[in-house]
Image: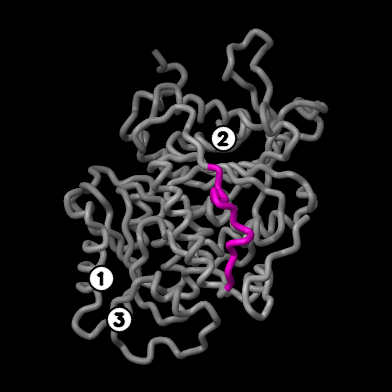
Amino acid sequence: MRPALALSGGGRTLANILSATEWMLPTPATQVHTVSVLPSHPSSPPGNFTFSNHTTAPKSSGGKGKEQGIPRFDVVRDDLLHPLANGNKARKLDALLPLLRRRGATDLITCGGCQSAHAAAVAVHCAEWGIRSHLLLRGEKLDVPTGYNLISLMFGNVTYAARSVYAHRDEMLYEHARKVAGTKGTVLWADDIVRDDFAVDEETAHENDSKRVVIVKEGAGTVQALLGVMRLVEHLSNLSSFQKDEEVHIVVDAGTGTTAVGLALGAVCLGLHWRVTAVMLADTLERYREQEKSLISDFKGLCHEDCRDVIGADGLVHWVDRFSPRKFGNVLSGEIASCRHIAQQTSILLDPVYTLAAWEQAVDLCRGESRGAKVVMIHTGGTLGLFGLAQRYPQHFAAANEQP
């Protein structure tokens, strides 16, 4: 195992930095379930599998799939972190939200799609931390609010933005922040606060009654968001089921790509033999690599240490296409049925836009090139998005006796 990387002139390791950080989540702990993969029957066509969740199955069930040699993978159940706002959305706010409150934030502005899990997580967790949230959601008001849209409406202050306005996100966010701040308030970008304040700041917040409005970009793709993901890596590496020198293959779906970069950086800085594969969903390979380089560069500045000697020329994350590429947000025929099939067999609920893509990749890896390694899928949450999909694709959510 490689030694843990020293990240500052004083020799502080990532573990030291994480232990000194104030967190939103009371603990990094999460459940890890083990899933086995078997063909539905010997004559099944490729891609048809039966799944078994060993973690939740009764001990007397006979252990189907536990036999030596049966492909299996672990699922990190971050979808169970919080009843409403969980997954990587909560992880990315884990270090960010306490920092913003410590710097006196009274209001937080962010944006996302109409069913944005990020916007909903911001609304819920800001309410928990006494910060007013203002959410700019792309598109039109829904006739029947549901899913993450409903959560955003209940916990935050929602404004719907026309797509033409939303196309210029930075300008849109800043203009709305100025309106919220008023003539006496202050507007700050979260990125600027993060760069200026990594050490614990004891300054007294709320010295006057003026508003201090902070803008968090779509998806919370900031360097501070990386720390919450790295905290998860440290937690997993200390579990008895993760051996220190074990080869681990992490799989995650990628929206902004921030979670994947945080996982990879955490593994490198902790000296772990982990490979991170991210399934690209929302952008091109070039854009994901640009985001990776930008976040790594910001992380170097945050820690005041040149990390170039531990970062390969080709980057840290292995970016791959989804097995069935499509325009982001689209759902293909049979994918909702696949999510239902998996839920009924494992009690793990996926959504076809994000987590199903990572599940398919994990299944392929544990049956193929990574069969000798430990394959681990990070469940990034997002299951309330199914409520919105049920409005868009009602025909795919029919009861069994209503199927054509």
Can you say whether 311 is above or below 79 in the image? below
- Asked if the magenta segment contains residue 316, the reply would be yes
> Residue 152, image x and y in percent?
35, 56
The magenta span reads 305-318
Numbered circle sitting on residue 127: none
> Residue 84, image x and y in percent?
47, 53
Residue sticking out furthest to the top: 43
Q: Regarding mark 1 in the picture, which secondary structure is present there?
A: helix
Which image quarter: residue 3? Answer: bottom right
Q: Residue at x 35, y 40 (%)?
A: 388
The CA span between labels 2 and 3 is 44 Å
The CA span between labels 1 and 2 is 38 Å
* Count of marks, rendered view: 3
- The residue pinned by badge 3 equals 211
> Residue 234, image x and y in percent?
68, 60
- The residue pinned by badge 2 equals 359
Which badge, 3 or 1, comes first in the chain's sequence? 1
Nearest the viewer among 284 and 401 is: 284
Viewed as shown, does residue 41 lie left or right of 188? right
Disc 1 crowd, CA 10 A, few/some/many (<14, 14-19, 20+)? many
Q: Residue type at mark 1: give it.
A: Ala
Viewed as shown, does residue 99 lie left or right of 269? left
Viewed as shown, does residue 71 lie left or right of 359? right
Q: Regarding mark 2 in the picture, which secondary structure is present there?
A: helix
Q: Residue type at mark 3: give it.
A: Lys
Which badge, 1 or 2, comes first in the chain's sequence? 1
